[in-house]
Image: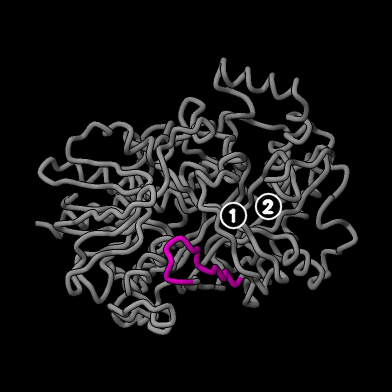
Amino acid sequence: MEFDYVIVGAGSAGCAIAARLSENPSVSVALIEAGGRDSSPWIHIPVGYFKTIQNPALNWMYRTASDPGLNGRKLNWPRGKTLGGSSSINGLLYVRGQAQDYDHWRQLGNAGWAWEDVLPLFKRAENWEDGENELRGGDGPLSVTHSRKSWKIVDAWVKAAQNAGFPYNADYNGADQYGVGYFQLTAHGGLRCSSAKAYLKPIRNRKNLEIITNVMTEKVLFDGKRAIGVQGARGGHPIVIKARSEVVMSAGAIGSPQILMLSGIGPSEQLTGHGIDVLHASAGVGKNLQDHLQARPVYKCSFPTINTRTRGLWNQAKIGLEYAMKRTGPMTMAASLGTGYLKTRPELETPDIQFHIQPFSADNPTEGTHRFDAFTASVLQMRPESAGELVLKSNNPNDHPDIHPNYLATQLDQDTIVEGIRIARHICRQRPVADVITEEHAPGTAIADDDYDALLNWARDTATTIYHPTGTCKMGPDSDKMAVVDERLRVKGVSNLRVADCSIMPQIISGNTNAPAIMIGERVSDIIREDAR
């Protein structure tokens, strides 16, 4: 098989790239996905993420190494393995980040990535249910809506946060992120709007686009240092897919660096240690790994929550019937409903913490909710200093790399998570939410606000990922020796090969990563078309 463009990974970015490049009928495009079609009903039901993150047919099932910053704990890192990638199994939350995030990318030497450059791409991708304005898009492929479900306990938290002095913000994707309010969702009509549904479904019959599923990409093929295709496996049989023009890696922040290293692009000592010939020594491949770590204060309450509303066959049947008949109810719910973008220090220009307010609680969501009514006031640091790395385990593509997140490795990160917990507590002491809280379940009143060490240790013992790995093939100028791609996302040291997914972020953005990943796909498709002229 031979095509003009071969895209590896049908995730948030890859679907957008395939759709945009195939708009030109004179070029042929192959989109390769290791997983299968997005046919599972749990993908399309919003609350289905509780099911999909446990399903190895839809999830790569990554797990981190023991992390010193978490007192030696290991974390599960779900990543999507189906059409739509992680946009098919995520919590549906739509967050662009801050304008300053992208201006910072530009200041690091990445021309074309400032806010003024990327805003038109966010708008082009988006179909915002409130309609187009100077900051929001109204006719893009990606449906973005307000939440269809409300909960009294979340409403009480939002009002309490206002009583604590934080402003209400009706649109955190608008002019200013600061304040509290409600999450926006990638959904439409009570169904998930994944990148596959937004970008692939409307064009599935395009003659010049071939979507190839169940192909595990093993490495990029080269003629000298020119990328000419990829080698993979399908059903245990080898497969080669050639590219006349370019190969684009969109396999995500874990998959893209792993494939580069297996192809001979990466830190020399790692490659030679696993018997891989070095095509181009690139020290930054797999480095600069950043993620958002969330601490999860839990409060028992007298208001009903998901914990008890979904317990028992009768309740589950009622919820299922409501969804089947009306596309409403708890099954339309995103992973979080309420949110806040706040500052841990008054001198900060922009918010540095994000809240996820969930009308349920659990020690481990995959093991079921608590048997009592409670809500979770998760808080995370949006711009961590700490960075980790991916390390090849072997030269076998089926062996997941060792993932070392290196959470809470700096004083700033430690200070921010502790202050975030304190702010969570402060809000929960305000009315009206304080009136219905019966007990602080975690961290618990035995740990005082001024006990810094105990709060930090509780975070180390209990905090978890919010599933935003980034940065492992970072973008940067030639002066940055750890940069893997340039500002046009070309892999340095070789030709006809690009990376386009969250791995290219030089610094993680202030918020969830699905919307920026789609923007990156939109951006690189423009770049490729410009460079082909």
Residue at x 33% of width, y 50% of height: 14
Which mark is drawn over residue 108?
A: none
Up-down relation of residue 220 to residue 239 (above or below): below
Label 1 sits on what residue type? Ile
Residue 372 in the figure: left or right of residue 517: right
User: Is residue 113 within the magenta segment?
Assistant: no
Residue 307 appears at what percent x and percent y? 76, 36
In this orientation, does residue 173 appear?
A: no
Count of numbered marks? 2
Q: Position of residue 190 (x, y in %)?
A: 51, 27
Callout 2 secondary element: strand
Q: Nearer the viewer, mark 1 or mark 2?
A: 1
418 shown above or below 194: below
Q: Colour scheme in the image?
A: one colour
Q: Label for residue 378? A: 2
Q: Which mark is residue 466?
A: 1
Residue 130 shown left or right of residue 260 in the figure: right
Magenta stretch contains residue 403:
yes
Q: Return the residue nearer the eye: 169 or 254.
A: 254
Which corner quadrant holds the C terminus?
Answer: bottom left
Tell whether label 2 touches label 1 (CB within 8 Å). yes
The quarter of the displayed image where residue 110 is located:
bottom left
Whole-angstrom CA distance, mark 1 to mark 2, is 10 Å
Which class describes the residues within 10 Å of circle 2: few (<14), some (14-19), or many (20+)? many
Residue at (30, 31) in percent of width and height:
202
Element at badge 1? Answer: loop
Question: Which residue is at 72% across, 47% downward?
Answer: 376
Q: Going by the image, does 232 lie left or right of 323?
A: left
Tell me which numbered mark, 1 or 2, is placed earlier along the sequence.
Answer: 2
Seen at 21% across and 68% down, the residue is 222
Q: Which residues are magenta?
A: 394-406
Q: Amino acid at mark 2?
A: Ser
